[in-house]
Amino acid sequence: MNNHKKEYEILCEKLESRNIDISSVIESLKSQKIETPSWGYANSGTRFQTFLWRGAAVTTLQKIDDAAMVHKMTGVAPSVALHIPWDVPEDGDFSALKQYTESKGIRLGSINPNVFQDDIYMLGSLCNPDPDTRSAALNHLIECIGIMEKTGSEILTLWFADGTNYAGQDSLRERKHRLESGLKSVYERLPSNKRMLIEYKFYEPAFYNTDIPDWGTSHALCLKLGERAQVLVDIGHHAQGVNIEQIVAFLLDEGKLGGFHFNNRKYGDDDLIVGSVNPFELFLIFNELVDAEMSVDQPASSTAKNIAYMIDQSHAIEGKIAPMIYSVMNCQTAFAKALIVERDTLSKAQRAGDVLEAHRILNRAFQTDVEPLLIQVRTESGYPANPLDAYQKCGYEEKISKDRGIAETAGGYQ
């Protein structure tokens, strides 16, 4: 602890010399919130195999227990997202599910409909040429709005696997019309205090075209729907080399950035641990978010203050809870580094056209070791200084491995 105090004091002196307000940074770090996904605690894998992990959650209650453990270790993961129908109670009692969740010290978060798993969705959901299938998909989305009312959820997260595999398979313009019509019906039923986030993905599972392939398509759809429809950016849903932070900056400035699904990728939608492949990219994304929130520009500032931060990962070979904790920690680190950027100095260098100096200022924040700062924030808030170490020593992993064993399914309610 004495070593930490010394390292923290040295870091504070360094940051103060850069005119960084330490108290403001600490306050921001303490207010950080990151939602974890129920499906991230269950068994998952690749197109080729699902590898069964001893102790992986099967029931929704077990998923909630695991999400509560992540929050207990980190202090910044107070909500868990539900996937419907995977997390529907057998008796349909969402009030009891909500009560159970709150008894564990967290709350139910975003609602994520599933319109890709059933056989009827082979040719799509809202874009399907069959009107009965489109009706079934629409009914499910409307059902999820009703679930939001029961759980107290504020966000409906929409991702569609809709697309085609072959040229000529379907009319691209007709699919666009069907999608717009379906989304309009959903939006019209969305309560005034709820938001709808539309995700995009440039390929997979369809291989000729994807109906919402990029942020521009999602943005155009949201503009037609209204102010409570916003874009959700999944870090893994982009082609190689895409400048994600530029997308973030644009959507912030337009007031249309609603949330994130944090993960990381090397090739495709790998759903790897946040920041594991490209931590600099993660930092640059957080830098745009912090810059917008601290600016006087509207609507960028107000938009940045209302963003839903969520993790969406598929832990296939590395465990379940520990990698989720590590992902949250990596988000904390990136956020802390973004908070210590010397913004006034950076702005002066940018306006002066001093390319190298501007880059050096930004890079200086990224290269700064913020671990002493994060340890200070965690200990002041009553959480473990090193959440991952604390989890590995607390015995929870051994307990659930013994109690749950190896599940044969990816998980349902119970």
Image (cartoon, rainbow, N blue to C red):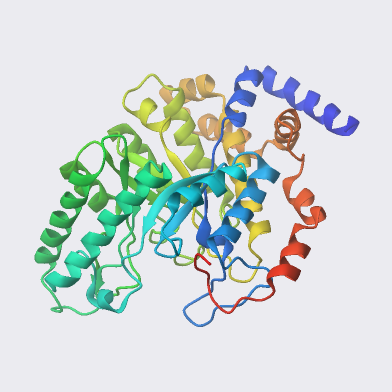
Say if 57 sits above or below 329 in the image: below
Q: Position of residue 179 (x, y in %)?
A: 17, 59
Q: Residue at x 35, y 44 (%)?
A: 149
Q: Position of residue 214 (x, y in %)?
A: 29, 56
Report the side of 103 relative to 224 (left or right): right
Furthest residue toward right: 2
Q: Quadrant of the N terminus?
A: top right
Q: How many marks?
A: 0
The answer to whether one can see residue 18 in this image is no
**Along the viewing direction, whichever of 362 and 254 lies nearer the viewer:** 254
Q: Residue at x 30, y 38 (%)?
A: 256
Furthest residue toward bottom: 48
Q: Position of residue 300 (x, y in %)?
A: 35, 29
The answer to which image quadrant residue 302 occupies is top left
Say if 368 sits above or below 53 in the image: above
**Along the viewing direction, whichever of 217 and 45 lies nearer the viewer:** 45
The answer to which image quadrant residue 403 occupies is bottom right
The answer to which image quadrant residue 153 occupies is top left
Q: Residue at x 26, y 39 (%)?
A: 191
The answer to whether one can see residue 201 in this image is yes
**Along the viewing direction, whichever of 3 and 17 lies nearer the viewer:** 3
Q: Position of residue 198 (x, y in %)?
A: 30, 51
Say if 274 sits above or below 250 in the image: below
